[in-house]
Image (cartoon, helix red, strand yellow):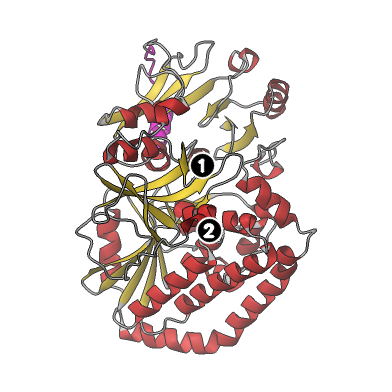
């Protein structure tokens, strides 16, 4: 079928729907809703049999939905209408929520429901609920629509009001620790909670309960790995990221800088007591002969300092484990280097170079781990250098519905992370070049079919299957063969890295590099003025 995705941006939900449709061999094109005139022209040019809108912030012109079957995904159950649906779900602590697929018409979220699915509401922040539960429910809804479309009248309840900054605001002298957590969670990742810290107006993100540290209300009690700990009337919370108005998100310590003079760094060891709640990025879980290395970096971005810490953790585990599983974080496995920190830097070339070399040092450590078995667990989405970090492992396992972006060029980079060694080794040179040049998301199902990853497991039994897989993989003969292969390929590996970095050097250091402008647009979330050509599926078989 010829299907058009009419969207505001190519976000995680849109990419999940896109890859699912591609796997099912539909002809798929994407257009951005930039203006009414442009939408009409692009729709007419593609002439779709079906239009789906997984993520759309504008109204669809009647000339489109009257002439083409057009359906909108709404992140709310039957009867829910209007903006900020997930905020209302989290604010009310509802236990069940849902996704409906509606026929577009003149009523705001008022069209006929053709498919729906419900999900349990996890205690988390809004973006995490969207990236996981909403995405999975939307995929199930899409399947139901194709298999057995319904005709259910939408309940035309009043459209709920848009959330205001006053509804999100924290009253530090009255709000409990849990209330503060709730307000930041239902505002994260957009727009955040506007507040003032040490005289600086900023939005708050990434909240975590602290069970041990105590102090005065709103006093900065400690800092850790870029986060700050603030006292509340009944406890304390960590805030991992801040954003000044008209700027972009950064680790809290990067924003507050000299305002943190005298605040101590409260470090945690790699193996620490998890019987209480606190903030941490890197942790280890051990089960049988397997060490699970978790690295919950915000939005999957990895700074030079985070790469170094993760490398130290990996090196430590190599000495006492048979199998190491790289787990990634709660919402992403990894998305490679930290673009926001580079955009903030006064020495962008130097800090970018430092970041990519730190990433390479980490991946070199994984590649050369010749006395352990390494497994990458792609239980969450991964992009750019994060994908190629996974490919440095002996085995790569993924959860169904995960989306991968194995490319760099949308940011004007050629990339490193030993990708010219690990990717062709798995998929061949022709497919490797296609993935890098197409610069499109792929499903893990497709990745398995081309030999890029080793196994895909279902959502419900993923972690049980992962553990079974990992425990059975340690084998002395495999280790011997691995050591011999590393010895044979050592020179090739280093040559690949050398050639990658030679190409990347001007991309970081030269003022005319496209990377600087594309990174700026990405970090500041500047809206595209046209749909990227790579997303337009005209002529795509």
Task: Decide which of 386, 201 is in the foreground and name it.
Answer: 201
| Displayed quadrant of residue 508 | bottom right
Q: Is residue 464 above or below residue 12?
A: below
Q: Quadrant of the C terminus?
A: top right
Q: Is residue 455 visible?
A: no
Badge 1, how many Cα within 10 Å: few under 14, some, many 20+? many
Q: Earlier in the sequence, mark 2 or mark 1?
A: 1
Q: Position of residue 539 (x, y in %)?
A: 70, 39
Magenta span contains residue 153: yes
Expressed as whole percent of the image width and height from the top left, the position of residue 7 reads: 58, 31
Does residue 118 lie above or below 181 as drawn?
above
The kind of secondary structure the magenta stretch mainly shows is helix
Q: Nearer the viewer, residue 535 or 289?
A: 289
Q: Nearer the viewer, mark 2 or mark 1?
A: 2
Which quarter of the picture shows residue 346?
A: bottom right
The disc at residue 137 is none
Magenta-tinted stretch: 137-154
Disc 2, SS: helix
Q: Which residue is mark 2?
A: 258
* x 55%, y 72%: residue: 358
- State yes or no: residue 213 in magenta: no
Which residue corresponds to the image point at 33% horizontal and 77% vertical from the top-left?
Answer: 317
Local SS, label 1: strand
In the image, residue 141 sits, relative to residue 242, either above or below, namely above
Q: Nearer the viewer, residue 316 or 199?
A: 199
Residue 53 makes an appearance in the image: yes
Q: Which disc number belongs to residue 202?
A: 1
**The N terminus is located in which quarter?**
top right
Give the left or right position of residue 441, taking residue 102 as reference. Answer: right
Q: Where residue 204 sits in the image (x, y, percent)?
A: 45, 43
């Amino acid at each position: 079928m010829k299907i058009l995705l009419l969207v505001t941006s190519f976000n995680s939900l849109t990419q999940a729907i896109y890859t699912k449709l591609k796997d099912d061999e539909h002809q798929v094109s994407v257009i951005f809703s930039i203006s009414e005139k442009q939408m009409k022209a692009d729709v007419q040019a593609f002439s779709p049999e079906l239009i789906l809108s997984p993520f759309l912030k504008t109204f669809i012109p009647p000339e489109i939905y009257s002439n083409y079957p057009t359906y909108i995904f709404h992140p709310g159950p039957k009867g829910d209408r209007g903006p900020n649906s997930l905020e209302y779900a989290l604010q009310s602590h509802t236990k069940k929520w849902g996704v409906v697929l509606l026929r577009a018409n003149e009523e705001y979220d008022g069209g006929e429901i053709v498919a729906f699915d419900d999900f349990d509401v996890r205690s988390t922040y809004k973006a995490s609920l969207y990236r996981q539960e909403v995405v999975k429910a939307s995929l199930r809804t899409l399947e139901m629509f194709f298999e057995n479309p319904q005709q259910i009248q939408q309940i035309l309840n009043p459209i709920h009001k848009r959330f205001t900054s006053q509804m999100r605001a924290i009253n530090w002298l009255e709000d409990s620790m849990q209330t503060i957590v709730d307000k930041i969670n239902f505002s994260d990742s957009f727009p955040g909670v506007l507040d003032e810290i040490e005289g600086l107006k900023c939005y708050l993100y990434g909240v975590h309960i602290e069970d041990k540290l105590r102090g005065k209300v709103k006093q900065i009690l400690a800092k850790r790995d870029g986060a700050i700990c603030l006292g509340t009337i009944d406890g304390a919370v960590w805030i991992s990221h801040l954003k000044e108005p008209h700027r972009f998100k950064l680790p809290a310590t990067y924003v507050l800088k000299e305002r943190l003079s005298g605040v101590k760094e409260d470090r945690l060891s790699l193996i620490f007591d998890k019987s209480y709640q606190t903030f941490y990025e890197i942790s280890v879980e051990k089960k049988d002969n397997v060490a699970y290395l978790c690295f919950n970096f915000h939005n999957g971005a990895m700074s030079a300092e985070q790469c170094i810490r993760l490398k130290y953790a990996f090196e430590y585990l190599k000495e006492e484990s048979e199998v190491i599983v790289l787990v990634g974080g709660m919402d992403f496995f990894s998305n490679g280097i930290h673009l926001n920190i580079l955009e903030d830097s006064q020495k962008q070339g130097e800090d970018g170079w430092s970041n990519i070399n730190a990433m390479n040092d980490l991946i070199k450590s994984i590649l050369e781990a010749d006395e352990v078995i390494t497994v990458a667990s792609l239980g969450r989405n991964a992009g750019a250098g994060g994908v190629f970090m996974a490919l440095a492992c002996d085995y790569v396992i993924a959860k169904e519905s995960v989306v991968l972006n194995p490319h760099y060029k949308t940011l004007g980079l050629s990339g490193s992370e030993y990708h010219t060694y690990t990717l062709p080794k798995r998929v061949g040179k022709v497919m490797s070049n296609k993935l890098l040049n197409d610069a499109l998301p792929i499903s893990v199902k497709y990745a398995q079919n081309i030999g890029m990853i080793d196994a895909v497991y279902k959502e419900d039994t993923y972690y049980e299957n992962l553990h079974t897989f990992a425990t059975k993989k340690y084998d002395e003969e495999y280790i011997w063969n691995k050591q011999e292969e590393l010895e044979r390929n050592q020179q090739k590996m280093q040559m690949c890295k050398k050639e990658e970095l030679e190409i990347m050097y001007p991309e970081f250091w030269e003022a005319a590099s496209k990377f600087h402008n594309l990174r700026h647009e990405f970090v500041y979330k500047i809206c595209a003025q046209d749909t990227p050509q790579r997303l337009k599926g005209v002529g795509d078989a």
